[in-house]
Amino acid sequence: MKNLIVFSLMLIVSLGSVKAQKFKGLDKSPLDIATYPSNYRESNKELKIIYSRPQLKGRTLSKLAPNGEIWRTGANEAPELTLYKDFYFNGINLKAGSYALLTIPGEKEWTIILHSELNAWGSYFYKKENDIARISVPVITTSDSLEAFSIAFEEDDKDIVMHMGWDTIRVAVPFKKIQ
């Protein structure tokens, strides 16, 4: 009988706390993941990036990601790029592991930075001495506009290219497979 009373009290308390729980609404810049290969049935991934997808919402790209300034490459925390195998990145042998992805947008080219400082909010605490590797890639301007910042991977000549796009800007970042 005593156990039944204790159980009943615990049930009442736990039900009350479930009702009191507050859940926040959807994030304005939702979290997304891009992988290579992108087929969900393929479990042997080579790269994965977790990033937030800001939207233009009537704003300009130059205001959200100003040319010449370090940018977190999306919204919220700096994206986390995970390599499941070693790759060459601009001639540097990158070991399998996780890296923060930062960028410096420019009119004609973007500087892509792989950084050791994970779990950093934005790029507010960026320190150049924590850079692992950098590469400059050309900017391509298209006629079609992407409302939300987007990242996708594709294989190109047996190497992997990370495509980033927002508004009418597109950049392609090469990762060379180590054979």
Image (cartoon, grey):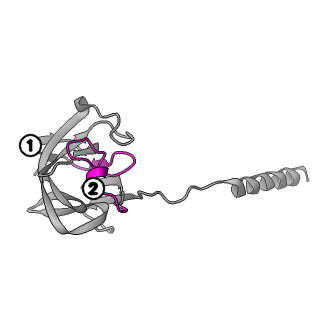
Residue 43 is at least partly visible in this image: no
> Within 10 Å of the Cα at label 2, are there few (<14), some (14-19), or many (20+) other Cα atoms?
some
Disc nearest the viewer among 2 and 1 = 2
- Residue at horizontal 16 percent and vertical 66 percent from the top: 142
- Residue at horizontal 71 percent and vertical 54 percent from the top: 20
Residue of label 1: 91
| CA separation in Å, label 2 and label 1 | 30 Å
Q: Using the rendered view, name the quadrant where residue 23 is placed.
A: bottom right
Please report the bounds of the magenta region as a residue range. Answer: 57-85
- Residue at horizontal 75 percent and vertical 57 percent from the top: 15
> Within 10 Å of the Cα at label 1, are there few (<14), some (14-19), or many (20+) other Cα atoms?
few
Task: Report the residue that reaches farthest toward the top.
Answer: 129
Residue 68 is at least partly visible in this image: yes
Residue of label 2: 61
Q: Is residue 63 magenta?
A: yes
Under mark 1, the amino acid is Gly
Query: 61 above or below 127?
Result: below
